Amino acid sequence: MTTTLAPAPAGGPGAGPSPARRTPVRRTAGRLVPMLPAVVLLALFMLGPVVWSFYGSFTNAALTGPNALAPEWVGLDNYVALLSDPDFPKALWLTVLFVIASAVIGQNVAGLGLAMLMRSARGPVRSVVSTLVVTAWVLPEIVAAFAAYAFFHAEGTLNSLLAGVGITGPDWLFQYPMLAVILANIWRGTAFSMMVYSAAIAEVPPEITEAATVDGANAVQRLVWVTLPTIRRSISTNLMLTTLQTLSVFTLIYVMTGGGPGTDSSTLPILAYQEAFKFAQVGYGTAIATVMLVIGAVFSVVYIRSLKPEVD
Amino acid sequence: MAQTVPAPSPVPDVAAAPPARRRPTPSVAAPGPRAARVLSNAVLVVVGVCFLLPLGWIVLASLDASATLAVRLPDEFTLANYTAVMTPEQTWVPLANSFLLSAGTGLITVVASVLAAYPLSRYRMRFNKPFLYAVLFGTCLPITAMMVPVYSLFVRLNLLDSLPGTTFFMAATSLPMAIWMTKNFMDSVPISLEEAAWTDGASAMTTLRTIVLPLMRPGIAVVFIFVFIQAWGNFFVPFVLLLTPEKQPAAVSIFAFFGQYGSVAYGQLAAYSMLYALPAVALYVLVSRLSGGSFALAGAVKG
């Protein structure tokens, strides 16, 4: 965690590789030259789409036809349509549900729980289980999505296990699509939280925990009063990162349910994709994308503020 | 339960050893450490099985001649699924595309982020702080949200269906995280060596090439592999930006395969998934070795 800026070369402004006779402005400009490739790439492909997103959401751009080449300015029409479209509030609600259930609660609690359990587990159990958990996370997105699809499919693993104990399982992907994708996302993403929390808990000074034990605190009290307050920075960092990651989950849901049945599991990324590419309403899709960008930006700013000391 | 003496002891001898080996003061409120340990092991085993089942399906189905969607031991093990999908147009061309895309993304990202990280790490400039904040902000932006505007931007720039265009875009999206990581690695290279070189008249680029880079080789490898794995596993970006099947990477072609044959040839789908996932898993193992400890990537993300 060495994030503080390195001290400037000692010896004042004269130090450094550039000759001292150049003026400070020209010297600074010269020092910035190596950053050009990165700045150009970021400006073109990161800033560009963001600006384009705001602009495009005010046009009636379409996928094909005359409106694809020469989109017209339609003002706030897309946003008005957004608010009157029943699919949008539904998608917003499903996104919130997805993020809170699978990231804020699911991955965080499961990750913290696993990190705690790992500490008191036997060596082989610990290494096998953590390998399995991490494997689900390391797999390419689409492969993980196939695995989850096969697990929750009507004829999949879950229902064949349930059949083994005499229960006829429902068609999870069709009857409970949100439950299936939420569980799948917990399965896929818990490893990250587990690793963050394992590292954080390992840094809790053992003296504090021992002192609490001597004072008669039981395991739950130690967790609530000692461990959690000590790792609170990791908790907030992890909450922000998993929220941002989960906000942009597309592949998992798209492969498992395709956003369906109907729009019953269409979160905002799925809805934006479908409006833009399936129904060819690029302008409308862009408006949804802009809303997502704004939500993501708000979370990012909160997150960065919490990291401020590390930049300064 | 753990504290009960193992059952098949022939004669219940009170004076026998077991009580002596027991913990001196079993606390009443909480389960003893041994019981807690057994309990947590048991919970972990259950969790492990839950995580194993979906993963196990891919492995077992890929070896099963008549695979279904449920995980089960194959009646007969076969490699037929692998030989069926291991054709140039089915697997090798998409995998080669994946490699080109990921290696290109990794290379561009590493070069650009090393160049950008050097001034950030070595000079104290007014420019640093806003730039680092912007970079941090960039690491957080949901890329998925950007794909619709990126598509229309690519239409305008005439970059749609272009491998180089997609590569540069993916490099740009991984740059913020890469710059952040590279700068942290570079900060840990002591500056005193460079100062000596500067005194001898070496330029910044010379010291970067001859002194800094050799010292941070493992860090650069970590950044490259990190970016490579991300690009290798990325589905949505090439799915939107690359249209011709001959140009599409494995992530997209495997999805097309799923759409066409996924409802019948589960074994082949699983075999293809294995072939495609293996490099990513292997590289992850490598990167965790490189940076010591399997929790390396999370540490890197933490900054």
Image (spheres, coloured by chain):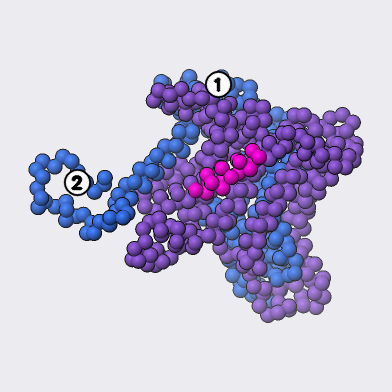
Chain colours: A purple, B blue
Residue at horizontal 48 percent and vertical 25 percent from the top: A169
Picture coordinates of residue B10, whole percent (x, y): 10, 41
Element class at badge 1: loop
* Pointer 2 residue: B5
Q: Is residue A235 visible?
A: yes
Q: Earlier in the sequence, mark 1 or mark 2?
A: 2
Picture coordinates of residue A187, whole percent (x, y): 51, 40
The one nearer the camera, B214 or B113, is B113
Q: Which mark is residue B165?
A: none
Q: Is residue A72 left or right of residue B149?
A: right
Report which quarter residue A222 is drawn in.
bottom left
Residue at horizontal 85 percent and vertical 42 percent from the top: A76
How far apart, in angstroms, are the residues tagged by discs 1 and 2?
Answer: 53 Å
> What's drawn in magenta, residue-wise?
A93-109
Report which quarter residue B241 is drawn in.
top right
Element class at badge 2: loop
Count of picture labels: 2
Picture coordinates of residue A157, whole percent (x, y): 47, 27
Q: Is residue B111 above or below residue A191?
A: below
Q: Nearer the observer, disc 1 or disc 2?
A: 2
Q: Is residue A223 left or right of residue A32?
A: left
Q: Is residue B11 above or below residue B74?
A: below
Whether callout 1 and callout 2 share a subunit is answered: yes
Residue at horizontal 54 percent and vertical 46 percent from the top: A105
Report which quarter residue B115 is drawn in.
bottom right
Q: Which mark is residue B265?
A: 1
Q: Are marks 1 and 2 in contact (CB under 8 Å)?
A: no
Q: Residues within 10 Å of mark 2 (few under 14, many from 20)?
A: few
Q: Amino acid at mark 2?
A: Val
The one nearer the camera, B188 or A235, is A235
